[in-house]
Image (cartoon, helix red, strand yellow):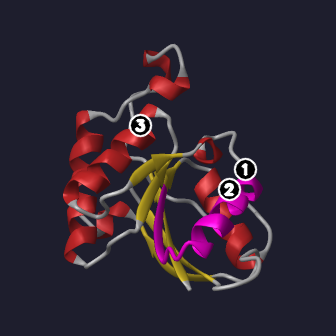
Amino acid sequence: MVNLYLVRHGIAAEREEYPEDGVRPLTSEGKRKTKQVAQQLFKLGLQFDLILSSPLVRARQTADILKAIGLSSQLEESTDLTPEGSIYSWLTWWEEWRNKGGSSLALVGHEPNLGEWTEILVWGEAKGNLLVKKAGVIGVQLPESGSPIGRSLLFWLTPPKFLL
């Protein structure tokens, strides 16, 4: 079984302040709250074999904070986690990773993707009803074999206010 943690990036600068969405950084409040969330996750004993992050600046900064707190020693980027990314493309990567023996994975990305991906994994389809707050965390248990679509178990849905 693989424990998958979907983490939304922290509070980021407003879209109007930057010419491209991909370069928007975390605000100072976003960095502070994300660090507090990461410290609580560490205190709860979470450890990830790998943190996989969207390459967009705000997500990468969030992933860097998770790594700096000690939640994982490994961090990689994936375009599958961008707002235009696809769960189906990511699933191909995940099956290879799972076959190498990974058991705990954090994905750092964006909304509405993370909520929709969770719905697809747990219920087999996205309905747009699950929202991940900024710096919020969802935990999903993925099956050991076969497709995880509609066969996964939601075990954690935590808005950041419960981790601050």
Q: Quadrant of the C terminus?
A: bottom left
130 and 56: which is toward the camera: 56
Secondary structure, mark 1, is loop
**Magenta-colored segment: predominant secondary structure:** helix
Distance from disc 3 to disc 2, alpha carbons, whole Å, reads 20 Å
Could you say which quadrant of the image residue 151 lies in?
Answer: bottom right
Marks 2 and 1 in Cβ contact (< 8 Å):
yes
Residue drawn at x 61%, y 41% is 79
Is residue 93 located in the magenta-colored stretch of the structure?
A: yes
Mark drawn on residue 86: 1
Which residue lies at the image location 44% right of the left edge and 42% below the top edge?
59
Spatial separation of the CA atoms under disc 2 and disc 1: 6 Å
From the image, tell me which residue sits under label 2. 90
Name the residue carrying label 3: 58
Q: Tell me the magenta residue range.
A: 87-107
Q: Nearer the viewer, residue 35 or 46?
A: 46
Q: Is residue 157 above or below residue 161?
A: below
Q: Residues within 10 Å of mark 1 (few under 14, many from 20)?
A: some
The picture places residue 38, in percent across and down from the top left corner, at: 27, 60
Whichever of labels 3 and 2 marks the residue nearer the N terminus, that label is: 3
Between marks 1 and 3, how big is the CA–CA gap? Answer: 19 Å
Amino acid of disc 1: Ser
User: Which residue is painted at 59% across and 47% down in the image?
Assistant: 81
Q: For numbered disc 3, what is the local secondary structure?
A: helix
Q: Is residue 22 left or right of residue 40?
A: right
